[in-house]
């Protein structure tokens, strides 16, 4: 599309956005960046906007985000505000002044707030749909406790919920761990995260974070309470969040050269039913069988839909729904009608199977569960194949250049981490710690840090990241 502003002979502005078309021009292994841009546009998840880093989230992406939601906090009202509100990156400065008013006694604790909202960030680089954008949707939790023990316990509880979102819903393997002092949330006591890895690019990506804020904000906003002894005490606070970045991680992990591949648990449509009428076939009967299949599946709680468009061929529909990543396709033609069966095609591996119509619900459930499990197993195998354990600087550089996820013995010193960043800075970006995994391999006594030669304190994941 081009525009001609003004009248007469004005110059047309060249449009550089991706155009939606059927099929993929780029292959995932050949040009990952262009492939990713093509997938998110052609699968009708996003549309590019005129402002760099801003994207239009289309219904297909929004439905996936809705399926990932676990709680709602809503607020209504149409009155004009008495004072203008500044766009903010996070809610600490909005919420915490009121926490100091709401919390008076130990009886007011714990206080737990959760919201789903959008966030705008102006300072960022390398815009990528879902992964890094000026505006994005997220879930944001803020909690307040009387003791550090309670706060510590919740940090890990929330982190486990985030792991489940990634692994059980998005079928993306992640590592739970703690961020370094350099990489933690600046206002927090410590930060934990779930970290994913994209083998095609050799980059780690932070999936979600759960922070213990300690008492830093309590001191800043004077959030205190009267404890059971009648004494004034500072509260302990946490914050935690994940964003629509999770959708981008899923696309990068599972997508292939045909387009998007959706795990069944987050697929807006889990089964698409397509009539395949041949010449002189009883189209009315075929359509009726398709409608019956959709009704039966929907009644069983399976998200199924019928593509009855007559202006597109069955083959064209196959390609479009493959592009959109629908986990299962059901085809019903004259032969299927005669044999009282349906043909089912899996999106993840392309296998086809004919099943009796009477077994439809049971078999579809088995197949959907199998796809969900297979996507996670496949992604985990690819991720694990990229993990390299090193012990020296030379091994570290070789693994980094080979796009590996590096597990290295580290002395846990900030100056050493800064030095690693400085020594690896280049066109592809510097290496950094991704997290120190909670699942720590044995660290033999006398093991030296790969970068400094000092005694190692822990194993940490290192690499380039998004």
Image (cartoon, rainbow, N blue to C red):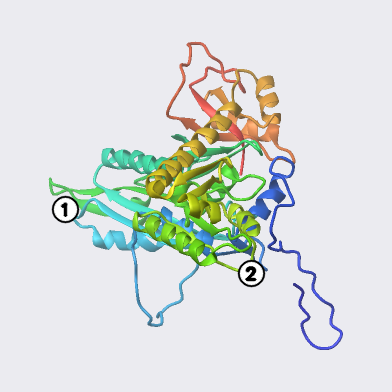
| Most foreground residue, 223 or 5 | 5
Looking at the image, residue 24 sits to the left or right of residue 87; the answer is right
| Most foreground residue, 310 or 410 | 310
Q: Give above or below for 86 relative to 133.
A: below
Mark 2 vs mark 1, foreground winner is 2
Q: Quadrant of residue 53?
A: bottom right
Q: State how far apart marks 2 and 1 are (Cα).
A: 65 Å
Per the image, label 1 sits on a secondary structure element best described as helix
Q: What residue sits 38% from the left and 49% below the top?
A: 358
Q: Position of residue 231 (x, y in %)?
A: 17, 48
Q: Quadrant of residue 275?
A: bottom right
Say whether disc 2 or disc 1 marks the residue closer to the N-terminus: 1
The tag on residue 367 is: none
Can see residue 53?
A: yes
Can see residue 173?
A: no
The residue carrying mark 1 is 107
């Amino acid at each position: 599309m081009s525009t001609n502003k003004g009248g007469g002979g004005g110059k047309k502005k060249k449009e550089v956005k991706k155009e939606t078309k059927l099929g993929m021009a780029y292959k995932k292994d050949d040009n990952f960046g262009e492939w990713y841009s093509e997938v998110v546009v052609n699968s009708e998840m996003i549309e590019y906007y005129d402002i760099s880093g801003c994207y239009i989230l289309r219904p297909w992406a929004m439905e996936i985000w809705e399926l990932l939601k676990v709680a709602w906090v809503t607020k209504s009202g149409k009155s004009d505000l008495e004072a203008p509100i500044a766009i903010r990156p996070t809610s600490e400065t909005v919420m915490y002044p009121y926490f100091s008013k709401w919390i008076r006694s130990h009886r007011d604790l714990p206080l737990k707030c959760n919201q789903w909202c959008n966030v705008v960030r102006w300072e960022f680089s390398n815009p990528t749909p879902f992964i890094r954008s000026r505006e994005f949707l997220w879930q944001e939790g803020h909690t307040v406790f009387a003791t550090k023990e309670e706060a510590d316990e919740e940090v890990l509880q929330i982190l486990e919920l985030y792991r489940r979102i990634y692994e059980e819903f998005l079928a993306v393997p992640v590592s739970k761990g703690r961020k370094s002092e350099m990489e933690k949330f600046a206002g927090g006591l410590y930060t934990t995260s779930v970290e994913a890895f994209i083998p095609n690019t050799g980059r780690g990506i932070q999936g979600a974070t759960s922070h213990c804020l300690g008492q830093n904000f309590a001191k800043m906003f004077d959030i205190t309470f009267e404890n059971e002894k009648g004494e004034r005490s500072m509260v302990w606070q946490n914050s935690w969040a994940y964003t629509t970045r999770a959708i981008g991680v899923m696309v990068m992990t599972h997508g292939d050269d045909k387009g998007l591949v959706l795990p069944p648990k987050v697929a807006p449509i889990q089964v698409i039913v397509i009539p395949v009428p041949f010449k002189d076939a009883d189209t009315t009967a075929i359509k009726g069988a398709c409608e019956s299949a959709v009704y039966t599946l929907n009644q069983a709680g399976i998200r199924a839909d019928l593509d009855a468009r007559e202006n597109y061929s069955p083959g064209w529909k196959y390609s479009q729904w493959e592009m959109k990543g629908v986990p299962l396709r059901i085809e019903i033609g004259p032969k299927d009608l005669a044999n009282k069966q349906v043909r089912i095609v899996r999106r993840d591996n392309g296998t086809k199977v004919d099943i009796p119509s009477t077994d439809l619900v049971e078999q579809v459930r088995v197949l959907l569960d199998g796809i969900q499990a297979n996507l996670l197993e496949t992604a985990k195998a690819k991720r694990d194949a990229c993990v390299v354990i090193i012990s020296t600087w030379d091994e570290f550089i070789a693994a980094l250049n080979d796009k590996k996820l590096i597990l290295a013995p580290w002395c846990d010193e900030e100056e050493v981490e800064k030095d690693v960043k400085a020594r690896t800075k280049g066109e592809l970006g510097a290496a950094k710690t991704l997290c120190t995994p909670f699942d720590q391999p044995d660290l033999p006594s006398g093991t030296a840090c790969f970068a400094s030669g000092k005694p190692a304190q822990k194993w940490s994941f290192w690499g380039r990241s998004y």
